[in-house]
């Protein structure tokens, strides 16, 4: 292998208060890793900090500066500039686990030869939520074969709430470029597109049962905070619609792969719908109806499939009682799985 083993993009916008933690957690990767700090038009000291790390760690850290384009624009800038065989996104308020990081690199090293390369490496991530003593870890050992190359036929059913997210994945860089991924600018929640669109091209996978990614939850302005998500619901709905338009999951021949992707669309649409129900204004309730009407018009078979499932039926229970049932289910799920 020549060149870098792993490129890691760190989208950074006004991140001066916490970005050093993310960067420092990745530096132990040494010369095999390139750390691409994408300063997304920040108005604080983010650009200065990025440049300082580039000076201190030449050949390992690169500072990329651009006009503000949002999280998706920063991720795409990282991908355009990546020279590594594999590609990972680490948000500027998250970090890599010191014990798991060497295992990840060792695994990628084993699959660096052209004939052995993976499409996707999957590892665990930790919901590092402020004030919670026992952190919830998203593991996949019940659904995926451990520490062996496998395809979709070997994947078992994922549990509800158990999905592959941006935090879980390291993609093959060239596969990611070939898959047609385009993330919209100035839009939150594009991580759903990032993890969904390439999956149609993923064939060779490997699951490393290691708690690699610390997903921080706790800033008041964080995009996954429920109140923030409701304020930004139009952006979530835009991404939801783009997922539906991305491709027809029923064209995927492998039944296990198709089932997973349908389940992913189901949970994203459920979260969008529940947030609109929780907001509860006539405008928000109309947006829920508009979302489902869009799905029906775009892909009638997908609409019928989602409507027949238990979540779809609950989301369409009539009146205040129906809303109450849906929101109660959402609160229980949030407690169990630790999100938001």
Image (spheres, grey):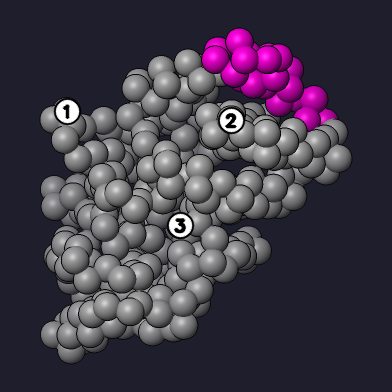
Q: Dot 3: what SS? A: strand
Q: Nearer the viewer, mark 3 or mark 1?
A: 1
Q: Which mark is residue 171?
A: 3
In the image, the segment drawn in magenta is 301-325
Q: Can you give x and y, in whole percent of width and height, for residue 18 in the image? A: 20, 63
Q: Can you give x and y, in whole percent of width and height, for residue 54 in the image? A: 22, 84
Q: For the residues marked 3 and 1, what is the alpha-carbon distance in whole angstroms?
A: 29 Å
Q: Are marks 3 and 2 in contact (CB under 8 Å)?
A: no
Q: Judge left or right: residue 89 versus residue 179.
A: left
Q: Which numbered disc flags the more N-terminal residue, 2 or 1? A: 1
Disc 1: which residue: 134
Q: Is residue 324 magenta?
A: yes
Disc 2: which residue: 280
Q: Quadrant of residue 139?
A: top left
Location of residue 284 with respect to 36 vertically, above or below: above
Q: Which numbered disc flags the more N-terminal residue, 3 or 1? A: 1
């Amino acid at each position: 292998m020549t060149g870098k083993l792993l490129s890691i993009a760190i989208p950074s916008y006004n991140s001066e208060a916490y970005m050093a933690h993310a960067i420092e957690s990745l530096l132990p990767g040494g010369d095999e890793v390139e750390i691409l700090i994408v300063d997304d038009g920040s108005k604080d000291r983010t650009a200065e900090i990025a440049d300082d790390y580039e000076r201190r760690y030449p050949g390992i850290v690169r500072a990329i500066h651009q006009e503000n384009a949002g999280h998706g624009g920063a991720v795409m800038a990282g991908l355009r500039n990546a020279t590594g065989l594999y590609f990972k996104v680490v948000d500027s308020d998250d970090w890599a686990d010191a014990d798991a990081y060497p295992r990840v690199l060792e695994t990628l090293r084993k699959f660096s030869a052209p004939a052995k390369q993976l499409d996707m490496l999957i590892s665990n991530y930790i919901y590092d939520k402020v004030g919670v003593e026992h952190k919830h870890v998203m593991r996949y050992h019940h659904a995926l074969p451990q520490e062996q190359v496998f395809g979709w036929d070997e994947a078992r059913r994922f549990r509800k709430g158990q999905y592959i997210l941006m935090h879980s994945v390291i993609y093959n860089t060239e596969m990611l470029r070939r898959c047609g991924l385009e993330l919209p600018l100035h839009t939150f929640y594009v991580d759903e597109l990032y993890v969904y669109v390439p999956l149609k091209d993923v064939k060779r996978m490997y699951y490393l049962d290691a708690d690699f990614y610390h997903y921080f939850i706790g800033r008041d302005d964080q995009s996954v905070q429920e109140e923030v998500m409701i304020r930004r619901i139009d952006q979530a709905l835009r991404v939801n619609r783009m997922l539906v338009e991305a491709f027809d999951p029923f064209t995927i021949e492998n039944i296990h792969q198709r089932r997973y992707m349908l389940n992913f669309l189901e949970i994203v649409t459920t979260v969008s719908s529940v947030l609109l129900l929780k907001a509860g204004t006539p405008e928000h309730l109309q947006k829920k109806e508009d979302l489902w009407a869009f799905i029906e018009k775009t892909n009638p078979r997908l609409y019928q499939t989602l409507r027949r499932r238990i979540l779809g039926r609950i989301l369409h229970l009539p009146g205040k009682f129906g809303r109450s049932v849906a929101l109660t289910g959402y609160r229980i799920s949030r407690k169990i799985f630790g999100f938001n």
